[in-house]
Every structure is written in C-alpha cells, then in structure tokens.
Image (cartoon, grey):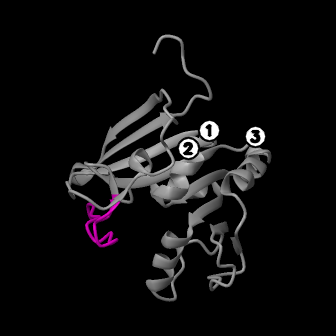
C-alpha cells in the first residue's frame, strides 16, 4: 500500500494563502530547505487542485515537478499541461487516490500538494494517512484555509497521533501527524 501525505505550509492562524490568494508571505531562512529535498525524493505521485496548479502556471515556464506523476483535478480538461507527466482529470479525487493507494510502497509517497479544498475532501473521505504541517510564524487574519478549515471537512473529526515536532530556522515549526483510520479508545 502507498501512503498519502498532505505536506503543506500554513500561517499560525491556519491559512495557506492570504486574502488575495497570494503566498508571498511564505518566508524562511537562507540556505535551509526545511527537509523538502529529502521529502521530495520519497514522492512518486503528486495530486493538485485546479487553483493551485493554475497559480503554478502563472509563475512562468518553470514547473517544479517535471520528474513526477502529477494529477490535476479540474472539470476543465483543456488546461495547459505543464509537462509529459501531468494529467488533468475531472473524476472524483477520492476514487483516484484510493486506486493509487493500492499500489506498491516502492512507487513512493502520494503527495497531496494543494490546495485546501482538495485536501479537505480527501481528509473527510479518510484517505490521508499523514499530515506534515509547516507553521510559519505569521498571523494573516483571513485567506484560504488549510485542511483544518476547508469546506467539506465537517463531520470528518479524527484523532491524530503526533509523530514529530521540530523547530526549524526562522521560527518555523514542523508538525507530523499520523491519521489513524479509526478513533483510539483512549481519546
């Protein structure tokens, strides 16, 4: 079985983009990738929502994942493909992810790369195995909610198991949680 990971950065108040949709507030320390390179080496597939993908396309000709299988979920199957390994699908993301998870662990992690709506729906469906959250020391006061506030997560309460809490340079905190498939009886 392949594991799915929602790996993302959010503000302290739980937003992944500000009120204008910008992520210009993301900052870090020079010469620190916060473990991203090591994480990326474990990834075999990446799932993206339409808005996140279009934001990437607007950044120019550079596409950050040319060497990975990328699935973009959109009803507009005529979106520009940023590379040979990009597919645009209009099917239910939960069905697609469930199929991917049946693959071999040797095929790599399945990275839920964004955004909050996609991650929220997959979390509500019980298909996310792990959360890797990087908390930026900033309060935005509004914007695009992370999974925690995304529409579609109502009734999707789950007890999480903390597996890592690490402080990085510039005050960024990494939190890792396993998402058990069933509630523990002692919670």
Q: What residue is rendered at 54% in x and 40% in y?
A: 130
Does 138 lie within the magenta span? no
Circle 3 Cα neighbour tier, 10 Å, few/some/many (<14 / 14–19 / ≥20): few
Q: What residue is rendered at 54% in x and 17% in y?
A: 184
Residue for badge 1:
126
Numbered range of the magenta stretch: 16-31
Query: Residue 36 appears at what percent x and percent y?
Result: 46, 57
Check the image and report above or below for 13 versus 88: above
**Quadrant in the rendering for residue 63:** bottom right
Q: What residue is rendered at 45% in x and 15% in y?
A: 187
**Quadrant in the rendering for residue 129:** top right
| Distance between the alpha carbons at the discs numbered 1 and 3 | 15 Å
Q: What element carries label 1?
A: loop
Mark identifier at residue 1? 3
Query: Residue 108 appears at what percent x and percent y?
Result: 69, 51
Query: Residue 124 appears at what percent x and percent y?
Result: 56, 42
């Amino acid at each position: 079985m392949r594991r799915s990971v929602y790996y993302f950065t959010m503000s302290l108040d739980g937003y992944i983009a500000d009120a204008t949709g910008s992520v210009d507030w993301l900052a870090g320390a020079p010469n620190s990738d916060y473990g991203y390179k090591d994480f990326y080496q474990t990834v075999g597939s990446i799932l993206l929502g339409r808005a996140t993908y279009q934001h990437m396309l607007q950044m120019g000709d550079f596409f950050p994942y040319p060497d990975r299988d990328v699935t973009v979920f959109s009803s507009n199957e005529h979106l520009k493909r940023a590379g040979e390994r990009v597919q645009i699908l209009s099917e239910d993301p939960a069905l697609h992810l469930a199929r991917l998870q049946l693959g071999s662990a040797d095929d790599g992690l399945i990275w839920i790369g964004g955004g909050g709506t996609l991650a929220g729906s997959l979390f509500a469906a019980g298909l996310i195995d792990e959360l890797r959250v990087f908390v930026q020391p900033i309060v935005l006061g509004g914007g695009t909610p992370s999974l925690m506030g995304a529409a579609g997560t109502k009734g999707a309460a789950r007890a999480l198991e903390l597996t890592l809490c690490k402080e990085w340079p510039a005050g960024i905190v990494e939190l890792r949680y396993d998402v058990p498939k069933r509630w523990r009886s002692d919670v």
